[in-house]
Image (cartoon, grey):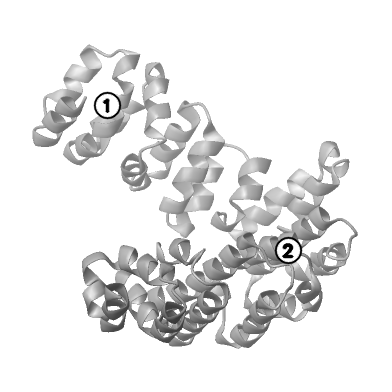
Amino acid sequence: RGGVTAAVEAAPGPWLPLFERFWVEDLSPVVAESLPRLARADAEATWRFVLDPARASLIRASYYHRRVLRRLAEQDTATIAAFLLAGPGRDHAQARLLPMLAPSRREAVLTACGDEPRSPLLRRHAALLPKRLRRRAAREQLSHRKVADDRALREDLRSLLPFREVHRELLAATGRSSTLERSAAYERLIRCAGLDGPKAVTTMLGATDRLAREQDPVHVAALGALAKVPAHRWQEAHLPRLGELIDAVLGSPWRSSQTNHGLLRLASRMLLLGMSHRRPAFTEFGYGQLERVAAEIGSRDIAAAVRPLPTGAVVELCRRLAPVMAGQAEVGRFKLPLVFAEALGRRAGEVPELLALLRE
């Protein structure tokens, strides 16, 4: 398998006719790995070969190769739609492909597939769908009788409608007696605001006073939903209120390791948002909250939080936490320095304070 892939990479020209002539389903995993190179050599012939009705197994194997999907996203709408319609598991393929398509092309591709996004795709990947298509598909789904009889599904779909239309009922659901129902209600409220726009996020943040007094599972759900709000929906004016929510959750007597992880994930998300979009206020907010949360909860969850961060950001965070780590070292606690040493590798030498602690 590795030999064939290497041979195709070196000289793709003769391989496509060979695969076509001697095709068997067992070749699917091998050919799927080689498709990006074949497409670079002759895109038209490669996709014609892939879309042959006899090669559904090849299409299914291609779903799991991001390089193949990235190549597919460069093709015209008709080719993409033909790929999605030719193989089994269309919802799964759409969910993997949509993030790689330019937002302006997504509606055309989904329309070319011949029907509205179905409920699983609509609910799980709503942020990837164009606003107009998302709302139209949600209203169409809500007209089905089986949706009317399923309260959870109905409320999930209504959370995809305009925020001003549904925010009162979504907010009212956060006062229900069941912890699970309140958790789901906060997820829907936050998702609806995040999909709608900055003004809706402002309204949502201002209406979450009750969240500070909630139980741990509700905190976990709300923090996870806040971390998924699209970057362009956040504004600097949101940061003070977001900081107050983090303070309230940190002060909760019911805080679990899952909540700690959610706090760190949200802080990391704000830091990455600021760095990738050149928004210094978010960068500083992210650093500040990571520093506060890490100092408050110790080192149990910090490893997972620093893993997605760029190395430069980890170096800066390590410098900021140096006083905290020094205080922990005085009582014989060295786990936090070890976490940073593992994350930084050779670049740990850029933080003299960390090296001093590791030598102790």
Q: Nearer the viewer, residue 40 or 105?
A: 40
Three-letter code for the amino acid on which mark 2 is drawn: Asp
Q: N-terminal of the two: label 2 or label 1?
A: 1
Q: Nearer the viewer, residue 357 or 112?
A: 357
Three-letter code for the amino acid on which mark 1 is drawn: Val
Looking at the rendered image, the disc whose residue lies closer to the viewer, 2 or 1, is 2
Q: Judge left or right: residue 215 versus residue 240.
A: right
Q: Nearer the viewer, residue 273 or 328?
A: 328
Q: Please name the residue shown 35% across and 75% down the image.
A: 313
Residue 352's quadrant in the figure?
Answer: bottom left
Provide the residue designation for mark 2: 216
Q: Can I make out residue 161 in this image? A: no
- Residue 330 percent coordinates (x, y): 43, 81
Q: CA separation, marks 2 and 1?
A: 48 Å
Provide the residue designation for mark 1: 31
Q: Helix, strand, or loop for circle 1?
A: helix
Label 1 Cα crowd, 10 Å radius (few <14 / some 14-19 / many 20+): many
Q: What is the total number of numbered labels drawn onto the structure image?
A: 2
Whether residue 152 is situated above or below residue 266 in the rendered picture: above
Q: Judge left or right: residue 325 versus residue 130.
A: left
Which quadrant of the figure contains the N terminus?
top left
Q: Please name the residue shown 30% across and 73% down the image.
A: 358
- Residue 158 percent coordinates (x, y): 77, 56
Residues at circles 2 and 1 in contact by the CB criterion of under 8 Å = no
Q: Judge left or right: residue 172 versus residue 252.
A: right
Which quadrant of the figure contains the C terminus?
bottom left
Report the disc number at residue 266.
none
Q: Please name the residue shown 68% across and 42% down the image.
A: 119
